[in-house]
Amino acid sequence: MSETIKVAKVKDEYTIVINKGYNNGIKEGQNFLIYEVGEEIFDPDTNESLGRLEVIKGKGVVINVQEKISTIESNEFDTYKVNRSKNPFVVNIFDTPEVEEKKRYIPFRGIKEGDLLRRIYT
């Protein structure tokens, strides 16, 4: 899969469509890094170009594959705790609080059509 993979459509802040599908070897469950090419970086001593900075927009997983396009959803998340006690405002040394850990998906950051993707191998 050496062809350039690009964002073809931004459906919403969590979902994109890319310009490659099963004809290009894309499969459900594959993980990708979404980025854009930023400014060129130079070595401070030699002034030699070190390449262009990749500006990371997020990470996602393929959820649907068609012949020439695929849909990717954000799979980055953070976690937070929810107090499920009967009265979360009353602290009682005999009452063990019921705390549930939940996850919240993180949207892609500033994603736009034409952004690039690279496969992530985990």
Image (spheres, helix red, strand yellow):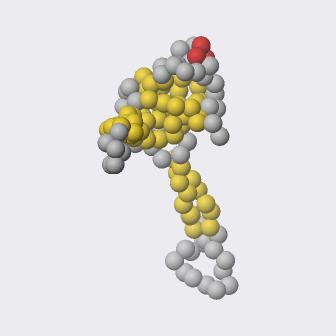
Q: Residue furthest front?
A: 46
Classify residue 52 by image quadrant. top left
Say which residue appears at 58% left-offset and 56% top-offset: 102
Q: Position of residue 16 (x, y in %)?
A: 46, 30
Residue 103 seen in this snapshot: yes
The quadrant the N terminus occupies is: top right
Say which residue appears at 47% left-offset and 41% top-offset: 58
Classify residue 13 by image quadrant. top left
Residue 66 seen in this snapshot: no
Question: Along the line of sight, which residue is nearer the eye, 2 or 110?
Answer: 2
Q: Position of residue 41 (x, y in %)?
A: 34, 41
Say which residue appears at 35% left-offset and 39% top-offset: 48
Question: Along the line of sight, which residue is nearer the eye, 2 or 84?
Answer: 2
Vertical order, 87 against 71 (above or below): below
Say which residue appears at 57% left-offset and 68% top-offset: 83
Q: Position of residue 79 (x, y in %)?
A: 55, 57
The quadrant the C terminus occupies is: top right
Question: Along the line of sight, which residue is nearer the eye, 36 or 71?
Answer: 36
Tally the numbered discs.
0
Question: Along the line of sight, which residue is nearer the eye, 41 or 53?
Answer: 41
Q: Residue furthest bottom?
A: 93
Q: Position of residue 26 (x, y in %)?
A: 60, 22
